[in-house]
Image (cartoon, rainbow, N blue to C red):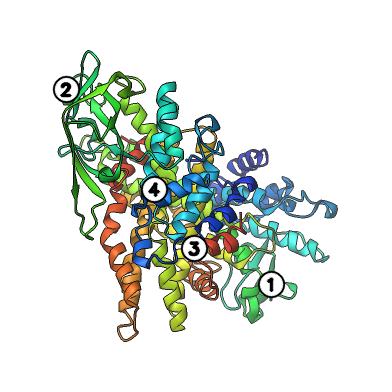
Amino acid sequence: MFDTLTLASLPPEDEALRPRIREFLQGRLESLPLDRRARSWQGFDAGFSRALGEAGFLGLTLPRAYGGQERGPFARFVVVEELLAAGAPVAAHWIADRQSAPLILHYGTEAQRRQYIPAICRGEALFCIGMSEPGSGSDLASVRTRAERTASGWRLNGQKIWTTNAAHSHYMIALVRTSGAAGDRQAGLSQLIVDLSLPGVTVRPIVDLTGDAHFAEVFFDNVDLGEDALVGQEGEGWKQVTAELAFERSGPERIYSSVVLLDAWIAHLQAAGRTDAAPLVGQFMAELAALRAMSIACTARLARGESPVVEASLVKDQGTGFEQALPLAIGDDLAAHPDDPVSPELYRTLLYVTHIAPSFSLRGGTREILRGIIARGMGLR
Amino acid sequence: MDLLEPFTRMLASACPPAVVRAVEAGEPWEPLWDEIAESGFLDALVAEERGGAGLPLAEVEPLFEALGAHAVPLPVGETMIARALLSRAGMAVPDGPVALASSAVQAPPCLSVARHVLIDDGERLQLTDPASMASGTPVPRRAEHGLRPLAAVLRAAQIAGAAGRLLETTVAYANERVQFGKPIGRQQALQQNLAVMAEDAVAARIAARLGCAGELDLSVEAAASAKSVASAAAARVATTAHAVHGAIGISAECDLQLLTRRLHEWRLADGSEGYWNARLGLLRLGTREGSVDWVRGAIFQAG
């Protein structure tokens, strides 16, 4: 089973991007403390994202005609791997570059492509994804936010919640009901691009348990949108979202969320001259290697133009399990040596990752939902 | 992959569960061995100029997986490796099954059905006979420098093959077995466990292939990561396979045990996950690179 998920290697021409992105990062992160870098793809810095765009590191999978680099998923893998390993603050452009632009490229009109994709590639147009609602989390097909036809386009009413980066974003691609009722499930859903500066849109940040406000609730009160707000086909929103999630679930962002903590812990062990933790270090290295190979295998399928929905779920479930195991095991290791000093910076990093880690297997589809997708992929149910 | 198809076909016909059971019960193994030897695959890793197929380890790895999937009770993968190493060293290659000794004190898998045992202390190869090893002829203490990494990736591949086969049969069983008026595979609790089983099977396979991506002179890091991931997966896969099958899976009559017993044997053979984790961790702690860089360089050989 899953025979298509097999060893693939990064092409040399994409591997060649590695020294370039390292050179770019040189001097930009040193002043960031570890616990800021540990925010990984939740660290927001719009200036950093624009600089990445200017240097040609955004839109790697997108056509040159729309301002992209036309390199493909492997190039994105290399650049993203370096950004995450270094703990670069990439949140500003992350969703736009990973999901929104490919979605618009695939399903959007020519006018939509020209309007949004070049700005995404410059790191200037920031996007968020409107999926969850107060009554719709894992049961995404039950969304109630509704867009009605008007003479000039759409009128939007409803509410989204837990929307990552909504407070900083210019646009939301929202999954909304355009026909039927909540009981119609997947039928009657569509994706709309919502300009978050329009009248009737209210964004209210939600403070998380670490004190950050990375997500928000978003209210739509008679928001008037043009005809061109619709992405793809009316009523095809579910199918489009499913394809989009394969992009979201398979990348290296699903294995590296705790890697800044991992490296800080290893540096601590080395400074203390401790080799007793070697078995745990070795276990993490072995698991990291297998996950990286699986993530590259998924990337290879994206590069062939396929949509590895089940395989991406498989990699994400394992990857987030790894990301979540790290802070717990590292915490145990450090506290198993209560008389050894731990730097406040390492300790803050440990606490941050420990506390935010439960979100790793919530964002982009919960663990239980992903395992259900895998089970269905194997012919169960 | 045109190798794999005939190899798998040969194993399916020569080594069905009844034959595995017969060999385990002490009946003559020679007919099975002869059939495998005549198929010509034993020299897959031997260089072409020495009369072999000259295939790289990466292309032979799927054959190791197939040996695992069919629970082959003879040291076929071991013999492929031994023949390649002996011929490369310019030594005579004997007929018959060869076991690989990677420990000075532990008997290797298939010792009782081997004609020879290959020993390597990291400096030179040596053949001994199984009886003298069983009766305590010491293997050099430096065995961990020699055959252990190669034996470890062979075990990792066998684990991957057996785990893949167990996944198929366990999913099929979950779709057939009816309780509470519906197939047990419709229960979410089972689905969640079977999804994790699939993840383990895929991880073991990709780790084994990553471990076999290099040449015969494997890096310790590549072997360590392959065997660590596969061994850890082996225990969990066997556990879930049994949990889904229920009591029938415990019976000797059910074929399940032919694979789950081997998963446990291969998990422990040539270093368990604990052994390889400790070695890998010490190597990691000896470098100043970041973890992603180190994994790329040491395990992926910067690919």
Q: Is there one chain holding both mark 4 and mark 3?
A: yes
Amino acid at circle 2: Ala
Q: With respect to residue B204, does B118 lie above or below?
A: below
Q: Residue A2 or A118: which is nearer the viewer?
A: A118
Return the x and y of residue A316 as percentages of the image width and height.
39, 48
Residue bearing mark 1: B119
- Quadrant in the picture for the C terminus of chain A: top left
- Label for residue A27? 3
Amino acid at circle 4: Lys
Characterize the local packing of mark 3: few (<14), some (14-19) or many (20 or more) Cα atoms within 10 angstroms.
few
Q: Residue B226 or A307: which is nearer the viewer?
A: A307
Marks 2 and 3 close (CB-CB < 8 Å)? no
- Label for residue A181? 2
Q: Residue A370 or B38: which is nearer the viewer?
A: A370
Q: Chain of mark 4?
A: A
- Label for residue A316? 4
Disc 3 to disc 1, C-alpha distance: 52 Å
Q: With respect to residue A339, does A165 lie above or below?
A: above
Marks 1 and 2 close (CB-CB < 8 Å)? no
Q: Is there one chain holding both mark 2 and mark 3?
A: yes
Q: The residue tagged with tag 3: helix, strand or loop?
A: loop
Disc 4 to disc 1, C-alpha distance: 42 Å
